[in-house]
Image: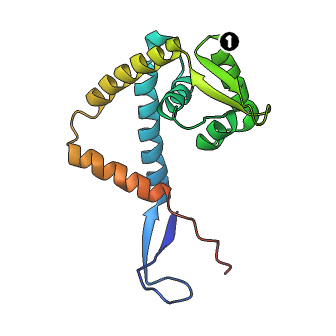
Amino acid sequence: MALKVPIRFRGDTSETGLEAERIFNMVNWYILHSRTNNALKIIIARALEGLEITFQEWIVMKSIVDNEQSEVTVSSLAEMFDMNMPQTAVLIKSLIKRNLVRQKVSLKDRRVKYLSCSRRGIKLVYDGDQAIQHAMRYWLFDLTDSEIVTYLDITKKISNFEIPPTQQL
């Protein structure tokens, strides 16, 4: 089934914004996106295989290392990765038990705990990053730099699009 998508032009003053219409085959779009997403997950999982860490654990630790100057909390990670608080707390507790992440209680509010990676965690993030970079270069070998930049730009633009409310017929 095709979906009619309204196209909005700059300066559009109409009520509906329907200046033009495109018809998309949603099944094909969904399958293409799913295959790309699944391939990425497989490539990254294989790259991290020898490190005894999951992709989700690695990406959370990577974000902690990358944002070390700002104060990373469990709630900020939950929001960043669209996870619920209990799920994020369990993940962080697992990383703390394995001595990969440390937490420091805020002096202003004892309920707030700031996260940082241990030396072992930082090394694991670095090793994982190197393995993933190598795997990604191999996976995307046939794409030029400009094609990769274009793909990322388009993906960012699509993900930042605000979905308009459903129109009543």
Quadrant assignment for the C terminus: bottom right
Which amino acid lies under the numbered mark 1 shown in the image of this protein? Lys
Residue drawn where x is 41% and y is 33% of the image: 39
Q: In this view, does 144 lie to the left or right of 63?
A: left
- Specify the farthest residue to the bottom: 14
Residue at 21% in and 37% down: 142
Q: Give the number of callouts.
A: 1
Residue 30 in the figure: left or right of residue 98: left
Depth order, front residue of 55/30: 55
Residue beneath disc 1? 97
Front in this rendered view, residue 15 or 118: 118
Q: Residue furthest front?
A: 107
Name the colouring of the figure: rainbow
- State the image coordinates of residue 158 (x, y, percent, origin top left): 45, 58
Residue 108 placement (x, y as % from top left):
76, 36
x and y percentages locating residue 126 in the rendered image = 41, 20
Q: What secondary structure is marked by label 1? A: helix
Which of the pair 60/113 is nearer the observer? 113
In this view, 65 is above or below 85: above
Residue 117 falls in image quadrant: top right
Crowding at mark 1 (Cα within 10 Å: few <14, some 14-19, many 20+): few
Please give left or right for residue 162 compared with residue 124 in the image: right
Give the residue drawn at x 59%, y 42%: 80
Residue 85 sits above or below residue 161 on the image: above
Residue drawn 55% across the image and 84% down it: 16
